Amino acid sequence: MAKRKTLEAYVADLENTDPQIKIKALKKLGEIGAAASHAVPRIILLLNDGSWKVRAWAARSLGYIGPLAEAAVPYLIRALDDKMATVRSDAALALGFILVSKQAQQYQSYRGL
């Protein structure tokens, strides 16, 4: 039986030099979603990674984390100028996920839902 990685192990994998390991960690952290919000500062750093695939997955992961990744908004806005179209697209989608989810939460709070 394979041993399951912990959340902290995936966060630690973000520091790995192998882009494939970083991407696997970013995918998993995105799947975990809001519970991985403490990794947002480290994920933000990967928006400047040398691999465009890592940058794209960093943006996606931030979007999947949702409104708890609000600190990433200025960095995602900068990523809209990335030289790779996939990174730009993923950054735009992430901004949508983060900001729309935040507005929905505020609306539900206002309506007492």
Image: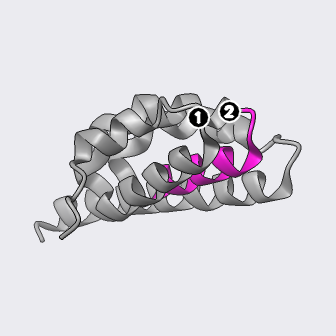
What quarter of the picture does the C terminus occupy?
bottom left
* Residue at image coords 34%, 45%: 10
Nearest the eye: 112 or 22: 22
What element does badge 2 sit on?
loop
Whether residue 65 is visible to the viewer of this picture, yes or no, is no
In the image, residue 59 sits, relative to residue 40, either above or below, namely below
What quarter of the picture does the N terminus occupy?
bottom left
- The magenta segment is 50-63
- Mark 1 highlights which residue? 46
Judged left or right of residue 18, residue 41 is left
Identity, as a three-letter code, of the amino acid under mark 1: Leu
In the image, residue 85 sits, relative to residue 70, either above or below, namely below
Nearest the eye: 74 or 38: 38
- Dot label at residue 49: 2
In the image, residue 45 sits, relative to residue 64, either above or below, namely above
In the image, residue 41 sits, relative to residue 8, either above or below, namely above
Residue 59, how many percent across, how many down?
A: 58, 49
58 within the magenta span: yes
Judged left or right of residue 83, residue 91 is left
- Dot label at residue 30: none
* Residue at image coords 35%, 38%: 11
**For residue 42, what is the image quadrant?**
top left
Which residue is situated farthest in the front direction here? 1
Nearest the eye: 64 or 46: 46
Nearest the eye: 62 or 3: 3
Whether residue 84 is visible to the viewer of this picture, yes or no, is yes
What element does badge 1 sit on?
helix
Judged left or right of residue 2, residue 59 is right
